[in-house]
Amino acid sequence: MTGRASIRLGQGPAATRLLGIGSYQPERRVTNDDLAQTLDTNDQWIRDRVGIVERRFAREDERLVDMAVEAGTRALADAGVAPSEVDTVIVPNCTMPSPIPNAAAQVADRIGIQAAGAFDLNAACAGFCYGLGVASDLVRAGSARTALVIGAEKLTDVVDPADRANAIIFADGAGAAVVGGAEQPGIGPVAWGSAGDLVDTIYMREHRFIYQEGQAVFRWATTQIAPIALKALALAGLEPSDVDVLIPHQANLRIVEAIAKRLRSKGAREDMVVADDIRYSGNTSSASIPLALDHMRRDGTVSSGDVLLMVGFGAGLSYAGQVAICP
């Protein structure tokens, strides 16, 4: 080489924050008694094992992209951000019927976001936390100005309705967050990883229906996820006692309660609010954390300025968590 060309790097803001949250659920409510009409189960059996009372199922003609558009539009309205101000759209999901085309480009176009960087991200039920971490880092690096992250799933497309173990758990919905620059940190570093040696505990059976080894996943989640949450706190320079709201992935109410118990044993406050959205939303995979947050804000159990600890986990096995300040 005869010359020494110098590459200039972008530079973004010192920090990022959540600017707004939004969510969408289908209208159809499916109770445990409804499922008992076709499955060998009953309301009490389901409540005792997973804590679910009801869940939402999308219409046959209602697509993942449709739900993502609704959640993303609501998040932008909540943030007071116009579509023209967004330059990056990330759609974490694991249930698009085909990998091509991706959901993100379609969602961006329908919302009115022009020429956005748009990509899907598949970390299954950890997807929202993965997407939020990527969006935050893109903004801080100057690669994006304002990012829209939408966890969206139509799990009823990939659940065998005759499979009692899984048909009672999974549901449909979407949850979104708008990420932008800030002077003071409003989103902490992501703590993430994977346990690929356990990949066979959750997979697509015959490339069609989701299958999981329920007991193996339960044991793993109840022992391994609380340490990830503690790592996210440490990376953010916070203590368990600083957490106002814990929002784990809504996989199973017993798992949620076990994670909260372990964090309280490490110093989290007794009055720490713990998300239990699974009771009325079911397990919506990458949508579950933003769905829970939006519902808790709407119910008044979470307020602007609260310290949120979010942690997702699922197939892969992948996991991720971070601290954020509620917008």
Image (tube, grey):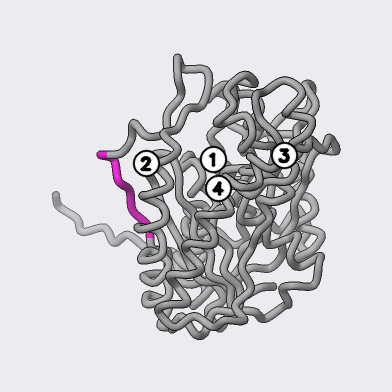
Q: Earlier in the sequence, mark 2 or mark 3?
A: 3
Q: Which numbered mark, 2 or 4, is in the foreground of this view?
A: 2
Q: Please, what secondary structure does the residue beneath circle 1 have?
A: strand
The structure residue drawn at horizontal position 62% and vertical position 19%, both measured from the top left corner, is 162
Percent position of residue 284, x then y: 63, 42
Q: Which numbered mark, 3 or 1, is in the foreground of this view?
A: 3
Percent position of residue 20, x then y: 72, 64
Residue 251 is tagged as 4
Write down the region rendered in magenta.
192-197
196 falls in the magenta region = yes
Residue 119 is tagged as 1
In this picture, is 158 found above or below 234?
A: above
Q: Hey, which quadrant is residue 203 in on the image? A: top left
Q: Amino acid at mark 4?
A: Ala
Percent position of residue 39, x then y: 67, 23
Q: Amino acid at mark 1?
A: Phe
Q: Which numbered mark, 4 or 3, is in the foreground of this view?
A: 3
Q: Which numbered mark, 2 or 1, is in the foreground of this view?
A: 2
Q: Amino acid at mark 3?
A: Asp
Q: Earlier in the sequence, mark 2 or mark 1?
A: 1
The structure residue drawn at horizontal position 48% and vertical position 62%, both measured from the top left corner, is 258
Q: Residues within 10 Å of mark 2 (few under 14, many from 20)?
A: few
The structure residue drawn at horizontal position 41% and vertical position 43%, both measured from the top left corner, is 217
Residue 293 at least partly seen: yes
Q: Please, what secondary structure does the residue beneath circle 3 have?
A: helix
